[in-house]
Amino acid sequence: MSKKPTLKIVGTGSFLPDTVVTNKDLEKIMDTTDEWITQRVGIKERRVIGESGLSTSDMATFAGKAAIEDAGLTAEDIDCIIVATITPDMNFPSTAIFVQQNLGAKNAAVFDVSAACTGWIYGMTIAEGLILSGKFKNILVIGAEFLTSLSDINDRSTYVLFGDASGAVVVQPADGDRGMLGSYIKSNGDLADLLWSYGGGTRVNKKVSDQEKMFDENGIDKRSTIRMEGNKVYKYAVRAMIESAEKAMEDAQITEDDIDMLIPHQANSRIIDAIAKRVNMPDDKVVRNLQYMGNTSSASIPVALDQVRKEGRLKDGDVLLVAAFGGGFTWGGLVIKM
């Protein structure tokens, strides 16, 4: 017997930039091949902001507006906006402030969450607490990332991985047997040096050593680009994703036999295969958009959720399991009955 749900998803939305960059395009500008990228991570192409002039808040606004409309609400009905992102418009004010302004959600309290690829799951867990407080009724939870703004073209091991996108949901208090049944989030700061970006943070001067120059030979500021110890990240990511799935199901008081669909964070096809195997999920019930999206961090799960809903693959009453891991390290999972 599963737990009573705490909140329900009443609307979803997503936004993808128009520009598509394929592996063949990357072959022209760096030492890589379509075969190498596909075999290593399973990505064939990615959506990028490119020269469009869009910002993270723009993408978040488009996805948020779509989710609000899907829920049959207006922007003024929203009483809280949570934006999960590691690519904010600026240090402050929050990206959520600009989303509020763009939407006209004048009745909302708004803030950002920084938990890397697990950000949207953290945001949903925070939304659960706010809903249970009884003070909030319509919360917009967005994952939005402009990751290509942090990509270093001189580092082929990371440059090929990332795309830009935004996904959003509107949640309300649950009033029946459908909604979020279980959640789990966790972090481990001991692994912070495996995946990071200095950005404009105050630790820059302390962290950047003489051995790691701040600027490369082309004048690119390496402090603001993504750095990753890929092999080590992969090892911990598989463990974290499996733990997230198991703990979320445990919290929901269900087993893998109760799961109808799995949406894992879209970072690496081998990681997706590993978690699918752990929960005995057949391939037709595992959502994969990595091949044409790339890794979009906190946006990957809400974008995929919106896509499968709009495609009719996820039906009312289906039990959904999501799991993610991200820099920090952070990881987490949710069980949601749609």
Image: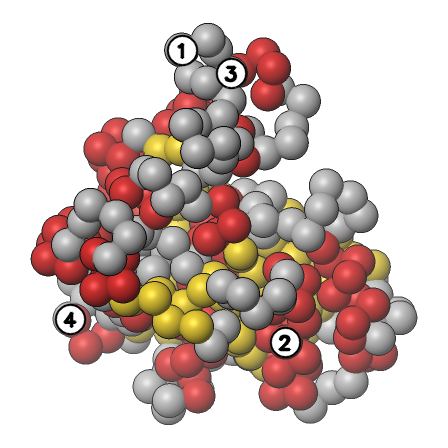
Q: As shown in the figure, which amino acid type bears the numbered disc 1?
A: Gln
Say if residue 196 shows up in the picture: no
Pair 2/4: label in front:
2
Residue pointed to by mark 3? 208
* Whole-number angstrom distance, CA of label 4 to CA of label 3: 45 Å
Lateral position of residue 260 relative to residue 331, left or right: left
The local secondary structure at tag 3 comes to: loop
The local secondary structure at tag 4 comes to: loop
Which is more N-terminal, label 2 or label 1? 2
Tell me the tag on residue 62: 2
* Whole-number angstrom distance, CA of label 2 to CA of label 4: 33 Å
Crowd band around label 3 with a 10 angstrom C-alpha radius: few (<14), some (14–19), many (20+): some
Which is more N-terminal, label 3 or label 4? 3
* Whole-number angstrom distance, CA of label 4 to CA of label 1: 47 Å
Which is more N-terminal, label 4 or label 2? 2
Q: As shown in the figure, which amino acid type bears the numbered disc 4?
A: Pro
Tell me the tag on residue 211: 1
Pair 4/1: label in front:
1
| Label pair 2/4, CB-CB below 8 angstroms | no
- In the figure, residue 200 lies in which quadrant? top right
Which is more N-terminal, label 2 or label 3? 2
